[in-house]
Image (cartoon, rainbow, N blue to C red):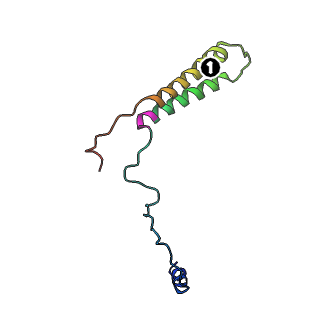
């Protein structure tokens, strides 16, 4: 870079001053936080588990019109989706500023 500036200065051309950008430590910022709280992620995992259980119950056995395949499985899937939506919309608890170092 300096060699290029020296060559341009020797030719009589002026170079624009370059501004150095601050270096960030591998993308880690001081006040970086997750979008949701720990409890939200736990609730989402529970919701996904309930949804997967519902899909497992939907797998057809000998009698595909049984109560477990048609009614109970759908209830589990819908309940799982409801828990996931609730986990996303629930406000995470705010941490005290004194605890953050």
**Residue 35 position in % (x across, y down):** 45, 40
Residue at point 51%, 83% (across, down): 9
The residue located at (47%, 70%) in the rendering is 18
Give me the residue at 69% from left, 24% from top: 59
Which residue in the rendered view is the most extreme toward the right? 62
**Circle 1 sits in a helix, a strand or a loop, which is it?**
helix
42 or 53: which is nearer to us?
42
Q: Residue furthest bottom?
A: 10
Asked if the stretch drawn in magenta spans residue 26, the answer is: no
Residue at the front extreme? Answer: 12
At horizontal 37% and vertical 53% (from top left) the residue drawn is: 30
Question: Total number of numbered labels?
Answer: 1
Q: Find disc 1 in the rendering and name its residue.
A: 73
Taking the magenta stretch, the answer to whether it contains residue 38 is: yes
Range of magenta residues: 36-40
Relative horizontal placement of residue 97, taking residue 46 as reference (left or right): left
Q: Main secondary structure of the magenta part?
A: helix
* Percent position of residue 8, x then y: 54, 82
Relative to 5, say whether 91 is above or below: above
Query: Which of the 4 image quadrants contains residue 69?
Result: top right
- The local crowd at label 1, few if under 14, some if 14 to 19, many if 20 or more residues have their Cα within 10 Å, is many
Quarter of the figure with residue 48: top right
User: Residue 41's spot in the image, x, y percent?
Assistant: 46, 36
């Amino acid at each position: 870079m300096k060699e290029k500036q020296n060559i341009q200065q020797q030719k009589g051309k002026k170079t624009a001053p370059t501004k150095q950008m601050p270096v960030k430590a591998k993308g880690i910022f001081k006040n970086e936080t997750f979008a949701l709280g720990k409890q939200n992620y736990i609730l989402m995992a529970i919701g996904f588990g309930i949804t997967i259980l519902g899909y497992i119950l939907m797998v057809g056995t000998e009698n595909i019109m049984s109560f477990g395949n048609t009614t109970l499985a759908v209830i589990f899937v819908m309940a799982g989706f409801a828990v996931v939506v609730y986990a996303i919309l629930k406000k995470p608890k705010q941490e005290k500023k004194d605890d953050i170092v």
